[in-house]
Image (cartoon, coloured by chain):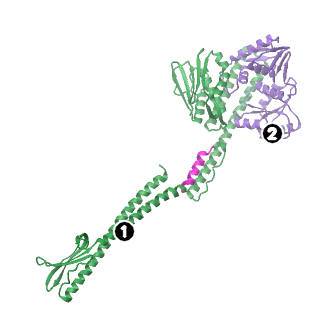
Amino acid sequence: MKILVIEDEPALYESILDYFTGEGNICEHAVNFASASEKISLYNYDCILLDLGLPDGEGLELLTNLKNSKKKDGVLIISARHSLDDRLAGLDLGADDYLVKPFHLSELKARVSAIVRRKNFDGNNIITFNDINVDVVAMKTTVGKTEVGLTKKEFDLLVYFLSNRNKVVTKNAMAEHLWGDEMDLSDDFDFIYTHVKNLKKKLSEGGAKDYLRSVYGIGYKFSDQ
Amino acid sequence: MKLSTRYNRVNILTSIVVLIITGIIYYLFIHLILTNKLDKDLAVEENEIRQYTRTYKKLPLPATYLDQQVSYRRPKSNTDDIREFSYTTYLNPKENEQEPGRRLVTTVNLNDKTIIVTITKSRVESEDLVRIILLITLAVMIFLLITLLLINRFVLNRLWKPFYAILHHMKAFEVTKMEHIIEEPTRIDEFNELNKSVNAMAEKVRQDYKELKSFTDNASHEMMTPLAVINSKLDSLLQTESFTEQQGALLEDIYQATGRLSRLHQSLLLLAKIENNLISDTQEIDFKDMIELKTRQFQELFERDKLNVSLHLSSRKVNMSRYLADILLNNLFSNAVRHNIAGGKITVSLSADRLTVSNTGKTSHLQNRMFDRFSKSTESEGMGLGLAISKQICNLYGFDIEYSNSDGMHFFEIILN
């Protein structure tokens, strides 16, 4: 997928670009309103990551311009503004999603993947990883030809892992993804272990290889290496 | 007491006192004037008798007219000349009854003899006159009082109308709505000034509100950006995957700390927002539905600690922000889980007037300051802001939140009004 990151903080966009690059993704970035405007008008992107607080302009204006020129680019707003008004204003103007800083890169990747999947809806709503096929619309998971019955949380977890394949995903990020960041969870995320264990068990019962492994107790990595 | 009531009271009381005093003075003066007039008449009569006596050297006939009697008598002994006016009553022969009168006792010289002359004039007429004047005065007084009352009631009410209209606008003023207070058309200078001042104040409040909002936005932005950088760098660092178990443990600690820092920051911003009433998505929500949803969300935590959860819910609709209601329930539920014992109990009951969350707990001593910011028990892993936020949310919507404990159970009650 082709992604444009509009963010003025170098340390942050470097990390994002770093995380997204690879697996056939093309990532570009713009650090201000002017260059972002230019890039948006010249090219088409699958998804634009838009920071609202830019040094030389209001991010929401970019969104308005984009929608006025009838472009189909997906837009995910990343903002430090945790205000409900801004969130609603962004979504009203046609943004696809809204993510508040600070966020986990894995969460960002999962959200961007979801937006891109929705944008390319023409038959491409199936995520494939080796022998695993996940239909995100019908919420069906198959390993080879065998259907695997997953609970809602296990399914969400699997989609999350597949969006972040070959990356280490922290338990913290997983918990926030599944239960929402508003929930003041305790720092002990061991209850996630139950879901991971069940997911692992069901996938291997379906005949899949053991792709999921624990990393130093911090998190998990889904890969076939 | 209303201003008009108070004003009425003072006004009418002083009016009555003044009217009574003027009435008395009026009465006394008229009385004096009429008495003077009677005395003059008596003097004229006396003069006539003297002249008659001088001219004809005899006394005129003691005549009795309608309202005048003249009588003569000789003094018992030799007396000096006397001339005395006095009040008296006399028998009116026509009416055959006692009537008030004015009497002049004087002396005339007839052939070197002194004769005492008594002239009596009826006071009935003048008394009648005084009475009529008094009645008219009374009538005027009552009429004046009634007019005053009516003026106070209707005119004052109308005069104060702009004031109450302005007051109504002020009460309805909401800073978040950014509206102007409507100018109330009035020709009264004081109200015009009030109108202007209120509008100036509202303008100032709006300005301050805007500044505060942009400050919280900026503070949030400036602090969240470095945090976002730390977080993303940690995520990137984790992907390099060439570190030892020990480094992994260190990384996890940093993750926890940044997570807590961002939650802490968000909580503080949230508190500021609630205090300044910056959250405005008020809508009708059913607490029952929200509690059931929250129970499902917390299912994993309940299972982890083997908690026995029971719900006794009846539908209760509340007008509040969904966002804040969610946070309130989150805080109550996390509290009930966090301070629970393994295999303990949580009971949530919702009725028309209150929401109660009770749980078995570790410590049973009561903390008075538990609703204060950053107050928490030593073993608590929370930040000590949850209950402060809950209390603030309750304050915002006029709910009461109370804590009590008995038999090792802790109760948090929200009284919904």
Specify the amino acid type for callout 1. Ile
Position of residue B134 in the picture relative to residue A191 (left or right): left
Location of residue B242 with respect to B93 vertically, above or below: above
Give the position of the C terminus of chain B as an image quadrant. Answer: top right
From mark 2 to mark 1, how far is it between C-alphas? 91 Å
The kind of residue on which mark 2 rests is Leu
Foreground pick, B88 / B280: B88
Place of residue B204 in the rendered image (x, y in percent of width and height, measured from the top left): 63, 47
Q: What is the drawing colour of chain B? A: green
Of all residues shown, which one is farthest toward the right? Answer: A42
Left or right of residue B123, residue B178 in this image? right
Looking at the image, residue B306 sits to the left or right of residue A101; the answer is left
* Secondary structure mostly seen in the magenta stretch: helix
Check disc 1 and report its element: helix, strand or loop: helix
Q: Which residues are magenta?
A: B159-174
Q: Residue at x 86, y 25 (%)?
A: A124
- Compared with B45, B293 (above or below) is above
Quarter occupied by residue B212: top right
Q: Is residue A166 visible?
A: no
Q: Decide which of B119, B178 is in the foreground and name it.
A: B119
Q: Please tell me how crowded label 2 is: few (under 14), some (14-19), or many (20+) other residues with Cα within 10 Å.
A: some
* Local crowd size for mark 1, using a 10 Å CA cut-off: few (<14), some (14–19), many (≥20): some
Work out whether B314 lies above or below B319: above
A60 horizontally vs B52: left or right: right
Q: Which residue is mark 1?
A: B133
Residue A62: which numbered mark, if any?
A: 2
